[in-house]
Every structure is written in structure tokens, then in C-alpha cells.
Image: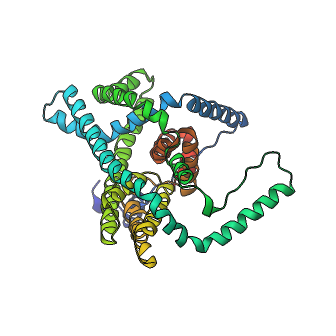
Amino acid sequence: MSSSSIPEPILDAADSAEAEIEVDSMVPEAPTPIQLPSNPMVFLQAAQFTLLLVAALYLTRAIVLPIVLAVLLKLLLQSGMRRLEKMHVPRVIAAMAMITVLFISLVSMGTALSGPAHDWANKLPEGLPRLRERLSVIAGPVESAQHFLRNAESYIHLTTTEAVQPASSAPPTSMASGLSELLFAGTASFASGLFMTVIILFFLLMSGDLFLRRLVEVLPRFRDKRVAVTISQQIENNIAAYLKTITVMNAFVGIGTGLVAWATGLDNPTLWGVLAFFLNYIPIIGPIICLGVLLLAGMLRIEPLWASFMPAAGFFVIHMMEGQFITPILVARRFTLNPVVVIISLIFWYWMWGVPGAILAVPVLAIIKIICDGIPPWAAIGHLIEG
């Protein structure tokens, strides 16, 4: 039948229906609602499993921490391995080359940090009188607070009491040892497992996608195989991009901090740049520690008093630009995390594994979110983690 024999009302109805179909195809589909388990026993079993997992991770931290660190380093170095493979470099030589470059970089930065840090440790005793004089403004309120705490302890008859010394009579060694314990608590197990981390990293780089292939072969259903491949690709792409972005931004923060220290007359600007680079890997707490150290260093070495605040002020401006504007714009394309969950994760992993755990808190949380988003029964957990 030709189109001329079709009545006009039917043609108009067909055109309007076709237009409605085109409009509907342009409208984005509504997000799939998150299905929560209807059986309350599922939540109880999930809580029991979580407690057992936390206990296992805490008791086996000397073994698990090097493995997790090696996996994250493998994600960071995987792109370099693939470039070398495209150049027909044998996988063994490529893995050794990547580990050697990483080791030389860490040793170089450690060497740049140790020498100036030793010089500042020698200058610390002679600069403490000046620091105590400049901090005399807050000495009165601190002593009043300490007096109040001593009276409160005696009033409620505490079984164990500890004498609180005034801030002016605290020995220099106690302050230094307290700062060292705060910064390096829990790193002994990490140092002892460094060799284990290198060995695991070498064999992970050597194996390539072997574990993913074996997992796909084991899974029974095609849908599960596709989910496993998708999650693996998202983890590799997003986490590797996140680690590279953070490393590059931390390098710019370190360079900027070093330039600020040099411009304001602070000794050993390389020390402060490397320190800012490392501490910026620890979210929130690391920049606060770096800000406090720069403030104390400025009070020790810079005259007059107003100029002693300039190194800390310069670092604060650099950190605000990096942390509030640049890094969120670069990272938000891949994933966003709930800041409250980030703080809880930071405290939790610091309690579990010390400073290395605080450094690994955000990448581990991001991996958990990617896995939960890819598995429908766990989608509610990924939704809670999302920013």
C-alpha cells in the first residue's frame, strides 16, 4: 500500500508516536533503586563477618600490610610495565627496572631529608629559649588548664594519676620523642616488611593479569566473569590515576613549600619541600602536622615575629589551592568519597597499621567503593561511601 492511500489522521498519529519514541530515547533512564536485604539475619551475618575480618587484619598486619602496599604499587607501576612491554623489553627486566627506579627515588628523597633533619636536630636545643619566649603568651592559659586538670583529678579520686609538668619546664628530649612517636608509631612492622613488599611487588609485576585470568576461568557464569573484569579494570584505571594525580600534586606542593621556605629565609628549603611531599599523602592530619612544624621552625629561625609566620602561611595557601580546588577537580571525574567516611577510614587504618595505614586509607576506601558498586548486594555500602 502506498503512502498516498494511508489516511492523514493515521499518518499524523504515526508521526506523533515516532516523535514520542525519539523524545523518550533522549531522556536518561532512572537509576536502578538499591535493593536492601529483607532478611535481618543478613545484617547480623555481615556484622559478624566484618568483626572477624577486622580482627584478622589487625592480628596479621605484619603480613597483610606489605601485600596491600605491593598491590597499590603494582597499580601505580602497571602503565610503565606495559610501555616497556610494547618496546619488547622482557617482563623480568621491566619489573626489575621499575622497582629500581622506585627504590632510587625513595632513597634519594630519604637522603635529602636525613641530612638537613640532622642539622635541625642539632640546632633545636639552642633555639628552644627563643621558642619558649615567643610562646610565653599562651603559657598562662596552658598552666591554668593544667592546674584545673590536677584539681579535677584529685576531686574525683582517680586511682592512677600522673604529674603534669608546666610547658616551660618540659625537657627538649621529651618533646622530640613525643613528636617522633606520633609520626612514626607503627612503622617498625612496615620497615621489617620492606623486603617482603619488594618481593611481592616483583612477582605481581611479573604475573601481570594472571590472577584476573584465573578468576575469570573459575567463575561459573558469564555475568560474573564480566563483572569481575569490569571491577578489575575500574580499580586499575581509577586507582592508578588517583595515585598518579596525588603524587604529581604532592610534588608540586613540595616544590612550592620549598620555594616558600627559601623566599622567607628558612634554612634547608629542600627539607621542608620533601617533608611536605611525604606528609601530604596523609589526608587532613599530614598537612596539619606540616603546618605546625613549619610554624615552629619559623619561630625558631626567623626574625621578626610576624615574619616567622610566613612559611606556615605560605604552605597553608598552597595546601588550600591544592586540596580545595585543583585535586578535587582532577579526581572527581573518577570517583568522589564522603568526607566523613574518609575521616573515619583515616582514624581506623591509622589504628590498624599506624602511619602506613593512614597513607593507604583513601586508596583502600576507593577500592572498597568500586567493588561495592560492581556487586548489586553491596551497592548500598558503595552508596554510603560516595561523596
Residue 260: give x, y in percent of width and height: 33, 68
Q: Image quarter for residue 250?
A: bottom left
Residue 284: give x, y in percent of width and height: 50, 57
Colouring rule applied to residues:
rainbow
Count of numbered circles on the image: 0
Q: Residue at x 78, y 45 (%)?
A: 160
Residue 92: give x, y in percent of width and height: 22, 26
Q: Image quarter for residue 167?
A: bottom right
Viewer-closest of 108 and 79: 108
Viewer-closest of 160 and 171: 171
Residue 219: give x, y in percent of width and height: 44, 24
Q: Is residue 46 above or below residue 317?
A: above
Would you say residue 280 is visible in this rendering? no
Q: Residue at x 77, y 64 (%)?
A: 148
Would you say residue 214 is visible in this rendering? yes
Q: Residue at x 72, y 68 (%)?
A: 144
